[in-house]
C-alpha cells in the first residue's frame, strides 16, 4: 500500500496576469494557463542593458587580476555572470581544449584492461 504524502491545501486564488480564478496553493500567483504561456518569457535575473554593456566593454579585461571581481561588485552580480556576459559580447574567449587542466587526451590517459 502506498504511503499518503501531505499535499498543500488548494484554495481559490486570483491570477495576477489575467485576473481569472483558479484552485492553487497559498503561494500560487499565476494560473496554469498563464504560467504555460509565460514560460518562454522568464524573467532574467541579470539583465544587460546599455549602461552595463558600456561598462563591460570599457573596463573588462580578463588578464588583469581582480578586474572581474571589481566589476561584479559594482554591478551586484556574481563573477560567473560577468564572465558569461563578457563572452557573449565577444570581450573574452573560452579556454581552448589544450589549455584546460586535467588529464592529457590520448593513449596515456586510457587504461589497458587486457592484462
Image (spheres, rainbow, N blue to C red):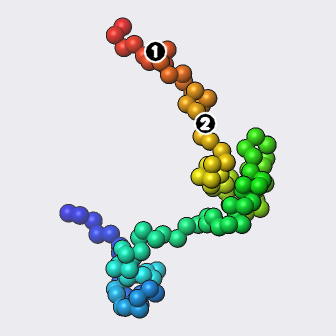
The quadrant of the picture occupied by the N terminus is bottom left
The residue lying toward the viewer, choosing from 114 and 78, is: 78
Q: Give me the residue at 55% from left, 67% from top.
A: 44
Marks 2 and 1, how far apart at CA: 23 Å
Number of other residues with Cα within 10 Å of mark 2, as a class: few under 14, some 14 to 19, many 20 or more: few
Q: Position of residue 21 (x, y in %)?
A: 36, 91
Q: Earlier in the sequence, mark 2 or mark 1?
A: 2
Q: Position of residue 83 (x, y in %)?
A: 65, 50
The quadrant of the picture occupied by the C terminus is top left
Check residue 14 in the rendering and tell me which mark sits there, or answer none.
Answer: none
Name, please, the residue furthest toward the top. 115
Q: Give me the residue at 72% from left, 56% from top.
A: 56
* Nearer to us: label 2 or label 1: 2
Q: Give me the residue at 32% from left, 69% from top.
A: 5
* Residue 33 in sight: yes
Q: Give me the residue at 59% from left, 52% from top.
A: 88
Q: Quadrant of residue 72?
A: bottom right
Number of other residues with Cα within 10 Å of mark 1, as a class: few under 14, some 14 to 19, many 20 or more: few
Check residue 95 in the rendering and tell me which mark sits there, or answer none.
Answer: 2
The secondary structure type at the circle numbered 1 is helix
Check residue 107 in the rendering and tell me which mark sits there, or answer none.
Answer: 1
Query: On screen, 36 above or below 81?
Result: below
Q: Position of residue 78 (x, y in %)?
A: 67, 57
Amino acid at each position: 500500500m502506498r504511503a499518503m504524502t501531505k499535499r498543500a491545501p488548494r484554495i481559490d486564488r486570483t491570477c495576477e496576469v489575467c485576473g481569472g480564478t483558479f484552485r492553487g496553493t497559498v503561494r500560487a500567483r499565476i494560473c496554469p494557463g498563464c504560467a504555460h504561456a509565460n514560460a518562454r518569457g522568464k524573467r532574467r535575473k541579470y539583465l544587460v542593458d546599455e549602461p552595463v554593456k558600456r561598462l563591460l566593454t570599457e573596463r573588462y579585461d580578463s588578464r588583469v587580476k581582480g578586474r572581474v571581481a571589481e566589476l561584479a561588485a559594482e554591478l551586484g552580480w556574481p563573477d560567473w555572470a560577468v564572465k558569461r556576459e563578457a563572452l557573449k559580447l565577444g570581450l573574452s574567449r573560452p579556454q581552448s581544449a589544450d589549455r584546460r587542466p586535467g588529464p592529457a587526451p590520448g593513449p596515456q590517459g586510457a587504461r589497458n584492461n587486457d592484462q
